[in-house]
Each structure stands twice: as structure tokens, then as C-alpha cells.
Image (spheres, grey):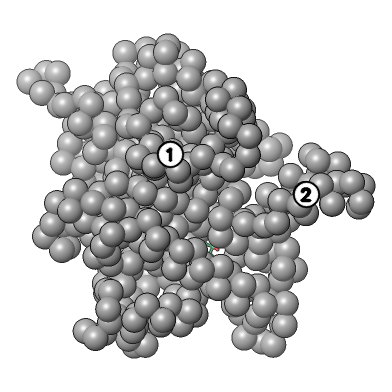
């Protein structure tokens, strides 16, 4: 009984932040926290809500080692640290190596490192956190859960890019897809709502946050997804452009004399809602500006919704049946305006949403927003990627 462990720690490491979540052995949430502005030269802010205590704290400069030590001290004080079953990490890119979560060993570390060229902002910071934790708590089991893993079921004719095949063979250039844990969570939740097995459930899952992606899921398997080799492909996002004419890249570099690295930065950080509206990458602010008569903000919202609907309609091609459409992510969960504009473009396939329900299902609510007469039901389900990781941790490290 002495060895009985109670908690799971889930970490999502970003370039200057760490989000952490605590679950108990039944995967009930016991708290979460965020450390931000790490290594930026600015004051570091940490906030948490754990076991009914909430706090906001500011520190002078902190690096990742100090941040993780601070988090461990906090967990020790709460009697959580010594009772950790394992620690799960969100890792963005697992390439073709991983189709499910795995216990981290030196092989896994090597592969996360190998995939870093495809996720240069994300994979190195996850690996860094993994190594820091290994040095501070050598006995703790660590698990990697990959954003790409859920999409390893994509058919070859979906993931292959129509460029010379040697780029796939020699450089692993192909569609990988992201947001896997979010789409997987939506699948599990929707299957349980409908009383079906995930293997019998077919959906279009629409994650609209700062990043955005549409995934078609056929009988529990990802069949197509809008993000690609990088999370830049697909929908219009907060600061990312999404689908574009590939001919434009050469034109911009050659004719406008913009360096490839700068173009990459423009497409990643200066485009999307921010680039079109000139107002913000935050959908709330763009919608507000549009309501106040700002034409470019209005254009940004129209473009965002049209491109999302276009991708959702296109994803029907990859399905044989459809049980429902699900919105998730910060925008998908909260913006009735955006959802209604998207669904207006889908009336052709028989979607009939209920205006009142669409306005009501926000702020963390789960519910259906379509009428009985709608050909397909449309649901809103708040995402919980951390829960999927915690479940994988328990699966890999049973608490016995
Ligand atoms: P991330 O992809 O970084 O995890 P989130 O899923 O939290 O992001 O989504 C962030 C986005 O959600 C922002 O664009 C924000 O404007 C949007 N959002 C949050 N609440 C609302 C709301 N009430 N109406 C419209 N957009 C919202």
C-alpha cells in the first residue's frame, strides 16, 4: 500500500511557457497551472488552481529549470509530488515513428529530437522539459503523447503530397496532421454521448482556436485532416495563412525580394486574422471591430468562416457515413457568430442549426445546436487534450 500512487502530471511545454495539469487515478481533474514569460527577460507569471487553492505569483527572471523546480516544490507542498504515478508530455511531432503514446526512453528521446526539424518551435522545448524532469526526478516514468499520432491512420493517397516522390522517400515530406489529442477527445466524447463504440463513430471534428484544423474521422480513424507537414496548412488561423497558391511563394521571394525566412515568418506570425484585419489575431477583437464597422475585420471573419466551411464540406469526400459534426477549441466552443456563419455555408448538405441553441451553447457547455430536421447533428464539445494524455498515461502505467 506504501507504493500506492495517486496523481498524474500532464505537461504542455511551449517556447516560453509551461501548462501543467493534475489528474487523480480516475482521471478526475485536481488542478491546473501555467508558468509564462519563461526566459523572455520579463517577469515570470505563474498561476494555478490546485486542490481548491488559486494563486497568481510573479517572479523575476526564470529559466525552464527554475520553473520546473518551482512547480515541483508546489506539488510537494500539496502532497502530490511523492504520489505521482507518471508524467505525460504533449509532444507536437512524432513523425512516422509513433502512432500512439509511449513511455519515454532514449530511443523515444532520439526520435523526438529527429522530428525537431519539422517542429522547430515545439519539439526541442518538450525534450528540454523531459530532460530536466529526468535530472530532477530520475525515477519518475515519463510518457510522450504526440499531436501527430492520431493521424497515423491517414491513407497514403491522403498524406502523400503531389510533388516528386523522392521528397517523401528521402526527406519524409508528407502530411502529418496535428491537434490529434483534441480530435481524439471529441471522438471519445461524441461516441459516449451517442452510446456507440469509437470504432463505429464517424465525425467531422472542427478545432477552431489560435490554430485551427478540420479532421474527418471514419469509424474511429482519422481519414483526412487540414493541417499538413506543418501546422501552417489548411484553415485561416489567428496569425497563419493556411491554404494558398504555392506559386505565390516563389513570386514573393523572387519578385518582391523577401527572404524565404522572412516569408516563413510572415505566413506563420503576421497572416491569418491578424494579417487580413490589421486588428488582432484574437477572434473576439476581430468580431468586435467588424461589429463596429471595420471593413477589413469583417472581411477577416467572412474569410475565416468560408474557408472553414469549405474544408468541412471537402472532408465529406473522405467519409462513407457521418454521425455528426463537432465544434471545439476556443472559437468553436465560444463563438455563436462564427459557428452560424460557417454553418450557413453548409445548408447545401442539409445542416439546419437552431439560432437560440447556437447562442446558448458557449462558455464550456456541451450540447447540440441543430434542429431535429437537420440532416446531420452539429455539436459543441469543449476540448480536453490533457485528459486524453492522462488516460494514455494510466493505460501505459497502470496504477497497481
Ligand atoms: P489555442 O489554439 O492557443 O489553444 P484556444 O483554443 O484557447 O487557443 O482559442 C483561442 C481563440 O479562441 C482566440 O482566437 C480567442 O479569441 C477565441 N475565443 C475565446 N473565447 C471566444 C469568444 N467568446 N468568442 C470568440 N472567440 C473566442
Question: Left of 99 or right of it: where is 173?
Answer: right
Seen from the viewer's position, the closer of residues 273 and 228 is: 228
Name the mark on residue 249: 2
Ligand 1 within 8 angstroms of badge 2 C-beta = no
Return the x and y of residue 236 as percentages of the image width and height. 60, 62
Name the mark on residue 156: 1
Q: What residue is drawn where x is 54% and y is 21%?
A: 113
Q: What residue is drawn where x is 19% and y is 48%?
A: 199
Return the x and y of residue 5 as percentages of the image width and height. 18, 26
Image quadrant containing the N terminus: top left
Question: Left of 208 or right of it: where is 223?
Answer: left
Question: Which badge, 2 or 1, comes first in the chain's sequence?
Answer: 1
Residue 84 seen in the current view: no
Seen from the viewer's position, the closer of residues 289 and 156 is: 156
In terms of image quadrants, where is residue 334?
Answer: bottom left
Which secondary structure lies at badge 2?
A: helix
Residue 158 seen in the current view: yes
Q: What residue is drawn where x is 26% and y is 62%?
A: 321
Return the x and y of residue 283 as percentages of the image width and height. 57, 69
Seen from the viewer's position, the closer of residues 114 and 285 is: 114
Return the x and y of residue 213 as percentages of the image width and height. 48, 55
Amino acid at each position: 500500500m506504501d507504493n500506492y500512487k495517486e496523481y498524474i502530471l500532464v505537461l504542455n511545454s511551449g517556447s516560453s511557457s509551461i501548462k501543467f495539469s493534475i489528474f487523480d487515478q480516475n482521471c478526475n481533474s485536481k488542478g491546473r497551472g501555467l508558468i509564462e514569460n519563461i526566459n523572455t527577460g520579463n517577469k515570470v507569471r505563474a498561476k494555478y488552481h490546485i486542490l481548491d487553492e488559486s494563486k497568481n505569483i510573479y517572479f523575476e527572471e526564470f529559466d525552464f529549470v527554475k520553473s520546473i523546480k518551482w512547480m515541483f516544490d508546489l506539488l510537494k507542498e500539496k502532497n502530490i509530488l511523492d504520489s505521482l504515478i507518471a508524467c505525460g508530455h504533449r509532444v507536437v511531432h512524432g513523425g512516422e515513428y509513433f502512432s500512439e503514446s509511449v513511455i519515454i526512453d532514449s530511443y523515444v528521446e532520439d526520435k523526438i529530437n529527429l522530428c525537431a526539424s519539422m517542429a522547430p518551435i515545439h519539439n526541442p522545448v518538450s525534450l528540454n522539459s523531459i530532460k530536466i524532469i529526468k535530472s530532477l526526478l530520475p525515477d519518475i516514468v515519463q510518457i510522450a503523447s504526440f499531436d501527430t499520432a492520431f493521424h497515423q491512420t491517414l491513407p497514403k493517397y491522403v498524406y502523400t503530397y503531389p510533388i516528386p516522390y523522392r521528397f517523401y522517400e528521402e526527406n519524409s515530406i508528407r502530411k502529418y496532421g496535428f491537434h490529434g489529442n483534441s480530435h481524439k477527445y471529441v471522438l471519445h466524447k461524441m461516441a459516449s454521448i451517442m452510446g456507440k463504440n469509437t470504432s463505429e463513430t464517424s465525425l467531422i471534428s472542427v478545432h477552431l482556436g489560435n490554430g485551427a484544423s478540420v479532421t474527418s474521422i471514419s469509424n474511429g480513424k482519422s481519414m483526412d485532416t487540414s493541417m499538413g507537414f506543418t501546422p501552417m496548412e489548411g484553415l485561416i488561423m489567428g496569425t497563419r495563412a493556411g491554404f494558398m497558391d504555392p506559386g505565390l511563394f516563389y513570386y514573393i521571394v523572387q519578385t518582391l525580394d523577401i527572404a524565404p525566412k522572412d516569408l516563413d515568418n510572415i505566413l506563420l506570425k503576421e497572416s491569418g486574422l491578424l494579417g487580413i484585419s490589421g486588428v488582432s489575431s484574437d477572434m473576439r477583437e476581430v468580431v468586435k471591430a467588424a461589429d463596429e464597422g471595420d471593413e477589413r475585420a469583417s472581411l477577416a471573419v467572412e474569410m475565416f468562416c468560408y474557408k472553414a466551411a469549405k474544408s468541412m464540406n471537402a472532408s465529406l469526400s473522405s467519409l462513407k457515413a457521418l454521425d455528426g459534426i463537432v465544434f471545439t477549441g476556443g472559437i468553436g466552443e465560444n463563438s455563436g457568430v462564427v459557428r452560424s456563419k460557417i454553418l450557413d455555408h453548409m445548408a447545401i448538405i442539409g445542416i439546419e442549426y437552431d439560432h437560440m441553441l447556437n447562442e446558448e451553447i458557449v462558455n464550456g457547455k456541451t450540447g447540440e445546436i441543430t434542429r431535429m430536421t437537420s440532416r446531420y447533428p452539429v455539436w459543441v464539445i469543449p476540448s480536453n487534450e490533457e485528459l486524453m494524455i492522462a488516460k494514455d498515461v494510466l493505460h501505459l502505467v497502470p496504477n497497481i
